[in-house]
Amino acid sequence: MVFKEADLPLEVVILMVGGMAMLITGVLLFPVSDGTLPYYENGLYGLLLIIFSLQIITLGKTPFGDMPRSKLLLAVGVLIAAVGIVTCFIPILIRLPRVLLFLCFGPGGFLLLLQMCFAKDKFRSWSKYGGIFRHLILGCSGVYVLSMLIALLLWKQSLLTTPMTAVAVLFFGVAIFYLAGVLRKIYRTYPEAEKRLGGHVELSTNQAMLLLMGVFMLLLGGLLVPVSLGMLPFSGSAQLGLLMVIFAVQMLASGSTPIGPFPRSWLVIGFGLLFAALGIVSCIIPEILVPALTVLVGVLNILGGVIALAKMWGSRPGKTNEPREPVPSVLTRLFAAQLTMNLLMILFGTSMLIPGLVPTPIIGVILAANGSVLLYLLSILVALDKMRGDVKNAA
């Protein structure tokens, strides 16, 4: 059973991670309210912005409704992701992420509720279909209404006591999970319902995650330089937590793990959910998981880099006993980008396991270089996809 292939659409995966974030936050707010645990508000805000950006980048689903995937929409999604990443890393950024989240949860939830009520292909059609679609009405209504309540709590945090806020957040998490379960059943029963919006931008799930990881590494590397000079505060706990959540989404969405791709079985899904839970806790509760996650992320980076290098050595361009043919330049560039990326991964993982081995400013440069290589690799993959499409059309 655990090795059976899992059928989780990407939309369901993102909703599951969002629901986990709410449920774990709701549970942790109880000990936070009596001073048993510390609380890092920025970590939660940044994490939620990342989840919104994932929906925009990968699905074209914004907090205000579905839109065709365009370069402008992609830029907006990347910008929101960047704000979320910086919010997690730097504790001094509070007002901007709170305003963005208020807009996403409040006006966004209200507009989505209106669209559901008045759009011809939603409430009226769902009511006629009956069955599981009635659960869809209930799930969507619950999520939209509770998101507006969360917006009110963001606007005026003293509206409810911390334990009552925890209860509201828990209900929101349950509603999101309920909606995810309903959508999964609908997409399994009616595969045509899982429609992807058209547009001028076509990024696969792996390419979208590569984009997010490149932005993550680039910003992390750039910020570590002023942090190392004492110019900015920094949350290492949220940095590790956010990295774990990105790993988790990759595993849940496509079976892509830090040590290589695997069939997306329920075992991989289980590890993905575990990674997500650890990452969410580390984002919200500072320092509690830092030692364990530092070792885990370091080992995963080293293993991932070494395994990838071993595979590359066996399939390097021009490796053949037959007379060599010219290797296309794009494949040579792809090989060079992957080689550089894997070497940087090993160096970064080693620096995490051996503190002080590499000075912090140099680690920042390494991470920024890794982010740049990831974005360069993404551009090559997009170009290859375009070339395949052109060849297919010509044939």
Image: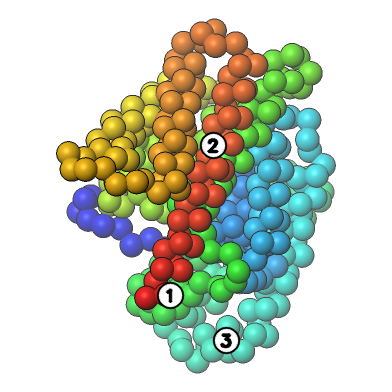
Question: Could you tell me if the residues under marks 3 and 1 are in contact, i.e. CB atoms within 8 Å?
Answer: no
230 relative to 130, above or below: above
Quadrant position of residue 70: bottom right
Mark 3 residue element: helix
Figure colour scheme? rainbow
Q: Is residue 283 visible?
A: no
Residue under pointer 3: 121
Q: Which mark is residue 88?
A: none
Dot 3, how many residues are within 10 Å of its Cα: few (below 14), some (14-19), or many (20+)? few
Residue under pointer 1: 393
Task: Report the amino acid beneath label 1.
Answer: Asn
* Left or right placement of residue 295 versus residue 323 in this view: right
**1 or 2: mark nearer the eye:** 1
Mark 1 residue element: helix
Task: Single out the residue that lies furthest toward the top.
Answer: 356
- The percent coordinates of residue 123 (x first, y second) are 59, 84
Task: Single out the residue that lies furthest toward the bottom.
Answer: 128
**3 or 1: mark nearer the eye:** 1
* Left or right placement of residue 48 versus residue 158 in this view: left
**2 or 3: mark nearer the eye:** 2
Residue under pointer 2: 373
